[in-house]
Image (cartoon, rainbow, N blue to C red):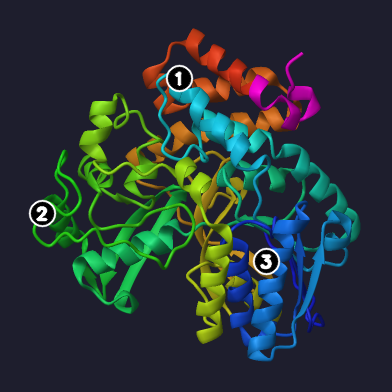
Amino acid sequence: MSSTMNPTAIRPKITLIGAGGYVFPFRLVGDLLSFPALRDATICLMDINAERLSRVAAATRELIEHHGLGARVEETTDRRAALTEADFVIITFQVGGVEAYRHDVEIPRRYGVDQTVGDTIGPGGVFRFLRSVTSYRQIVADARELCPDAQFINYANPMAMATGYLNALGASTVGLCHSVQGTTRMLARTLGVPYEEVNYRCAGINHQAWVLEFQQGGTDLYPRLREEMARRHVRGRGAGELAGDHGDHSDEAEGHSNYEGGNEQVRTDLMNTFGYFETESSHHASEYLPYFRKSPELIKEYIPERWDYYEICSAHDEQGDIDDQLERLKKELAPSVEYGASIVNSMVTGELSVIHGNVPNATGAISNLPADACVEVPCLVDRSGVQPTTMGDLPLQLAALNRTNIGLQTLAVQAALTGSRENVYHAVALDPLTAALCTLDEIRSMTDELFAAHAALLPEELRPA
């Protein structure tokens, strides 16, 4: 799981595929340019939508000019040109955009499966992955020819499925999220502890990793955390109803996950039952288990303030977002909490960094999860690439919860590798929330509707007859 950087690559080529996306690709550009060693890099921005791409490229050039940097910007809709001699390939796209995403959430809701995001597991996550499969195949096939030693960095959801599949195709890929960074910062704020004084260990799978240790110096903070969460987060009470709650939202971790201090009944209940705090927000975490979204009334008890990512995406002012980012980065060119740029910097300079990455478990990074799983663990990064650490066994109950999601993920990847439509039905049927709400006949009918809605974007062998 490493890709050795050529030490003579003084001016690395960093390619962003899906660079026309709102906010996030440009934030990554700002992160890259925040590192002195990358300020002469070639930043290649690629997207199939020339208009959206042009908007991001223009902001990038303006930022470079403002700070007087030597970076070179390439703007292209040609995938092969973008991949030619790339040292790093960063994936930030979803196939089908908001229109395809609408089917991911609206069709399952007709069957009672209400996904607050629907991009990780569940029916929405499975089909978001499957409609990206053809693009992944094309990218990796071109990369084998044009940049065979490139380090792939995947930011696209569903993280575990996409990253697992890219590695299975032969691309050395690490998947990146901000769940660990966002959650550990939120916990430090909740306890009033300076973040730089916190030590923690996290491991599991993407969007369902676990804070195994949380300490200040040598002091275990978990007793205080359990006490504070019990005080703040009572089922059925809204954010801010308890003294001291201010609905503290972090703007440090960008993207679709909320890391907040005022609405954590789901994660508090998970910690009370299974012993450890989970790294994804309560909104999102509620989708991955059968306990919290059985009815509209129960959802309201656990999550008083609805947060619907499809609605957010549909209403976003994309140009305004980019303009805001540009002004902030002009004032201060500093990195965000995202790991992508630090990986590039470490591989270029040899400077050691530690990230939490999503990687194949083939080497046994988590010894009581399956070898074909994609796991999220601490990784060391230097000129030799991304090197996962060995975490040993997770507590048995946490590994068991992770396996309920891993089964679905590996079946979806297997469907993409083999063209088995039956494996798609199996994957959706094994989703914990779907299984809690639907009969097997309903699951097959819902999956058929999703197949039909996404037919034009699926690999040919998975399309309906």
- Please tell me which residue is depicted at 64% across the width and 72% down the height of the picture: 29
> How far apart are labels 1 and 2 at the CA level?
35 Å
Element assignment for label 1: helix
Q: Is residue 351 visible?
A: no
Per the image, the residue denoted by label 3 is 56
Q: Residues within 10 Å of mark 2 (few under 14, many from 20)?
A: some
Position of 40 with respect to 298 (left or right) is right
Task: Indicate the secondary structure of the residue bearing disc 2.
Answer: loop
Residue 277 in view (yes/no): yes
Quadrant where the image shows the C terminus: top right
Amino acid residing under circle 3: Val
Could you say which is closer to the camera, residue 194 or residue 211?
194
**Dividing the picture into quarters, in which one does residue 111 lie?**
top left
Q: From the viewer's perspective, is the residue at label 1 or at label 2 nearer?
A: 1
Residue 155, x across and y down, in percent: 60, 55
Which residue carries the number 1 mark?
Answer: 110
Side of 6 where 396 appears, left or right: left
User: Which residue does the numbered mark 2 point to in the structure image?
Assistant: 242
Extent of the magenta region = 452-465
Q: Amino acid at mark 1?
A: Arg
Q: Which residue is at the front of the view, 112 or 202? A: 112
Q: Quadrant of the N terminus?
A: bottom right
* 151 versus 263 height, above or below: below
Look at 47% across and 59% down and name the residue there: 178
Q: Quadrant of residue 298?
A: top left
Q: Nearer the viewer, mark 3 or mark 2?
A: 3
In the image, is residue 331 above or below residue 85? below
Query: 251 and 41: which one is in front?
Result: 251
Residue 98 horizontal/vertical position (percent): 59, 41
Where residue 209 sits in the image (x, y, percent)?
A: 41, 50
As shown in the figure, which amino acid type bears the numbered disc 2?
Leu
Rate crowding at label 1 as few (under 14), some (14 to 19) or many (20 or more) other CA atoms within 10 Å: few
